[in-house]
Image (cartoon, rainbow, N blue to C red):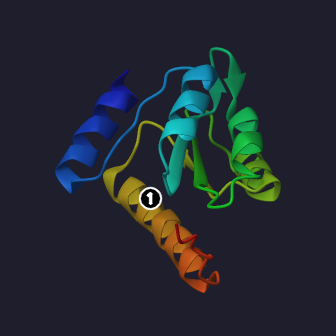
Amino acid sequence: MEDLSFLEYRFKEAKWTLYTAHTYREALRELSLNRMPVVLCECPLPDGNWKDVLGQLAPMPDRPRLIVFSRQADESLWAEVLNLGGFDLLATPFREAELVFTIGSAWLDWTSEQERQPLRKRSHA
């Protein structure tokens, strides 16, 4: 709960939009309703894990960047997150500068990919 409170505070201060989900099922619902460039996911979820979330993000046309966070963050988990297609791993409790830098980097990566993609055809009615 401490991590969520910190995220809520930091996002509000930065004027970023934060959608919250406490379970894998809630995350799927939010992902289906809202386009988002960055997804933060706690390592274990009550009904799944970050790999389940990553599997849902992979086929998306505007695939969000996944940042995993964990109290047991180590080099092995970091390597696994990166090798499977996640953007980064953050240790909790969060350090503000690292959090802001990592989210900003993920957002810039997502934005630059969007700019490189050819314009999508628009249907005219």
Q: Is residue 69 left or right of residue 9?
A: right
Q: Is residue 50 left or right of residue 119?
A: right
Nearer to us in this view, 103 or 56:
56
- Vertical position of residue 92 compared to residue 61: above or below: above
Viewport quadrant of the N terminus: top left
Residue at the outermost top position: 46
Nearer to us in this view, 73 or 17:
17
Residue at the outermost front position: 125
Residue 101 position in % (x across, y down): 41, 64
Nearer to us in this view, 24 or 102:
24
Q: Is residue 6 left or right of residue 102?
A: left
Considering the numbered disc 1 on the image, is that residue within a helix, a strand or a loop? Answer: helix
- The type of residue carrying mark 1 is Ile
Residue under the image location 40 percent in, 36 percent down: 19
Residue under the image location 61 percent in, 85 percent down: 116
Q: Quadrant of residue 62?
A: bottom right
Residue 29 position in % (x across, y down): 56, 29
Residue under the image location 39 percent in, 31 percent down: 3
